[in-house]
Amino acid sequence: DVIANYTAFQDLRLAIERPRAQRGPRRPAGTEPLERSPSGSAGSAARARATRDPLRIVVIYPDLLGTYGDTGNGLVLYNRARWRGIDAELVNLQSDARLLLSGDIYVIGGGEDGPQVRAAAQLREQNFHRVGDGSAVVFGVCAGYQILGNQFPGADSSIQRGVGLLDVTTERSNSPRAVGELAGVVTVPGWEERLGTLTGFENHASHTTLGAGVDALMEVRAGVGNGTSRSDGAVNGRIIGSYLHGPALARNPALADLLLEIATGERLEPIDDHEEMALREERLAHLGIPR
Ligand code: GLN
């Protein structure tokens, strides 16, 4: 019997598909090295990266911003890189550790107002806006998205400063808290066809207004999103924010691969995502949205 959530689909399938005879001695779950190759000519990405440092994926403060499972975004990126033979490193950076500015991809998750304020203060103090000398990919979700912006409300509704990587402003809304499924069609120029529809869930009390320096990530078809227009999220080059929990990159593998391709500069081979696609179809059908 196996119990697994969808960040484990690929590992799970590998374990089930591998003939019994090849399995060898039992190892504790999660410690097996993966030998997965992408379909097609395996390992070209691995060869291209062979002489570089490992792709460093940093999850920012999972101890403060781990309430909604967004830490899984780091795991998805790490595994999808490894499944292509890309040498990758996953750093779950706790809030008492010195900030690593040398990451290639940063993910920041959602959380309660208090931890969010603390995370933002630390990130500002430690110059998070300098990550990767401007070359890092950053994906922030909900509280993480708000932190990437100019300002957001604290638990007492006081104005808190974000790190200013996205030209967005978040304010407490008078509407009821936005809780439920969130889905939409990607509107970022050049990303529409590749990403199509994104699915996830949302849970937030504030609304976000986009400034002139960003594009919306998507046009909302179900749920609230930014709340100030029928849009969700914001994008400025390599900096991306959204209200999509899920984890978003488990529910939207195409978005995970896009982030990996931006970070590596390499075209990734497709992998068999039929379980993830089945999950997406189920969630979108539930909302009456075509894939
Ligand atoms: N505290 C923020 C809000 O309610 C973010 C919530 C979250 O990260 N889900 O708007």
Image (cartoon, rainbow, N blue to C red):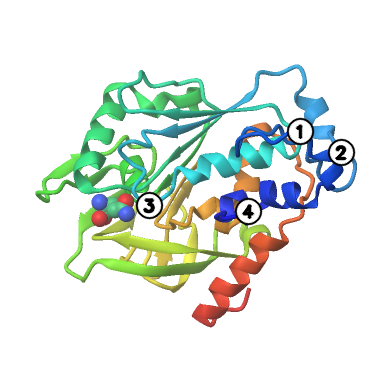
Q: Of 210 and 128, which appears nearest the observer?
A: 128
Q: Position of residue 114 (x, y in %)?
A: 19, 42
Q: Residue at x 26, y 23 (%)?
A: 125
Amino acid bearing label 2? Ala
Q: Residues within 10 Å of mark 4 (few under 14, many from 20)?
A: many
The answer to which of marks 2 and 4 sits earlier in the sequence is 2
Looking at marks 3 and 4 on the same chain, the residue that comes earlier in the sequence is marked by: 3
- Compute the Cα span from label 2 to label 4: 19 Å
Q: Within 10 Å of the Cα at label 1, are there few (<14), some (14-19), or many (20+) other Cα atoms?
A: many
Q: What is the secondary structure assignment of the residue under circle 2?
A: loop
Mark 2 vs 4: CB contact within 8 A = no
| Residue 109 in sight from this viewpoint | yes
Determine the CA span between mark 3 and mark 4.
18 Å
Q: Position of residue 213 (x, y in %)?
A: 41, 47
Give residue 160's mark: none
How dense is the environment of label 3, judged by Cα within 10 Å: few (below 14), some, or many (20 and up)? Answer: some
Sequence-first tag of 1 and 4: 1
Quickly name the residue at label 4.
253
Q: Which amino acid type is shown beneath numbered disc 1?
A: Gly
Q: Which residue is mark 1?
A: 85
Query: How many numbered marks are there?
Result: 4
Q: Which residue is mark 3?
A: 68
Q: Is residue 275 above or below residue 271?
A: below
